[in-house]
Amino acid sequence: MKIKWFGHSSFLLTASDGTKVITDPYVPGSYDGAVGYDPIKDVAEGVTVTHDHADHNGYQQLAGSPKLVKGEGDFKVGPIEIKGYLTYHDNQNGALRGKNTVFVYEIDGLRVCHLGDLGHILSAGTVQAIGNIDVLLIPVGGVFTIDAETAHKVAKQLNARVIIPMHFKTEKLGFDIAPVDGFLAGQTGVKKTASPEVEITRENLPHETEIWVLDHAL
């Protein structure tokens, strides 16, 4: 399986047979230009959208006709199995920013979890339902999502082998959220890839939890 980070919360997940799913595609230039990442040009068979904000729901901007996956339930895109779990965009049961879907993807025998714009610690029931996770894509910038401190708590809840931070301040993002540094401070097992893409297999999963920081592709 390959994981490529376009930027913000958008990734390209590619199975070994070539099936592709794009997560949370942004609308370039949305929020008065604050979303400064370049347009996504990759073509995929599926696209998942965790919630309907313009920095996450730009599926209509994508080339081709990817299958749209939204909300709770069980879905399939080729050999990729996807499950959606109801969560919230804030810590007040959605009163401030609405609902959010956590997606779990089963690809090549690995389980990848994308938390979307999660705004709270996960309930025990949700943690149990999600189950074992190999790779965790987690927001760390705060303000609109969980912050670095809460992100570490959620990461411990899910106990993934690889943690990939997302939804943080970069030179391409004008939102007033924190950069990734706060999430990395004091942590061991941090690897900066100097690349937007990694290939992960059952064989090369680390024995202890590691944080992999990708460079945005766009």
Image (spheres, grey):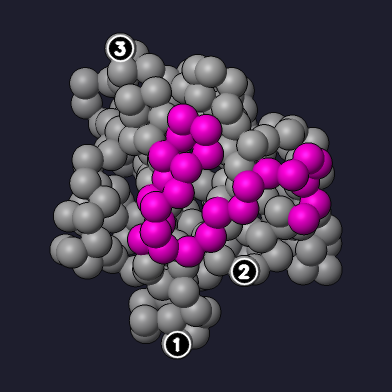
Task: Determine the CA span between mark 2 and mark 3.
Answer: 36 Å
Residue behind mark 2 = 52
Task: Determine the CA span between mark 1 and mark 2.
Answer: 15 Å
Callout 3: helix, strand or loop?
loop
User: Could you say which is closer to the camera, residue 14 or residue 195?
Assistant: 14
User: Could you say which is closer to the camera, residue 211 or residue 123?
Assistant: 123
Residue behind mark 1 = 95
Callout 1: helix, strand or loop?
loop
Which quarter of the picture shows residue 202? top left
Residue behind mark 3 = 203
Q: Residues within 10 Å of mark 2 (few under 14, many from 20)?
A: some
Residue 179 bears which disc, if any?
none
Q: Earlier in the sequence, mark 2 or mark 3?
A: 2
Res 65 seen here? yes
Q: Is residue 68 magenta?
A: yes
Dot 1 amino acid type: Ala
Q: Residues within 10 Å of mark 1 (few under 14, many from 20)?
A: few
Dot 2 amino acid type: Asp
Q: Which residues are magenta?
A: 60-85
- Is 138 positioned to the left or the right of 51 in the image? left
Proximity of marks 1 and 2: CB atoms separated by less than 8 Å: no
Dot 3 amino acid type: Glu
Q: Residue 131 location in percent, x, y? A: 21, 46
Q: Residue 218 location in percent, x, y? A: 74, 37
Q: Earlier in the sequence, mark 1 or mark 2?
A: 2
Task: Determine the CA span between mark 3 and mark 1.
Answer: 43 Å
Q: Can you say whether 81 is above or below 30 in the image?
A: above
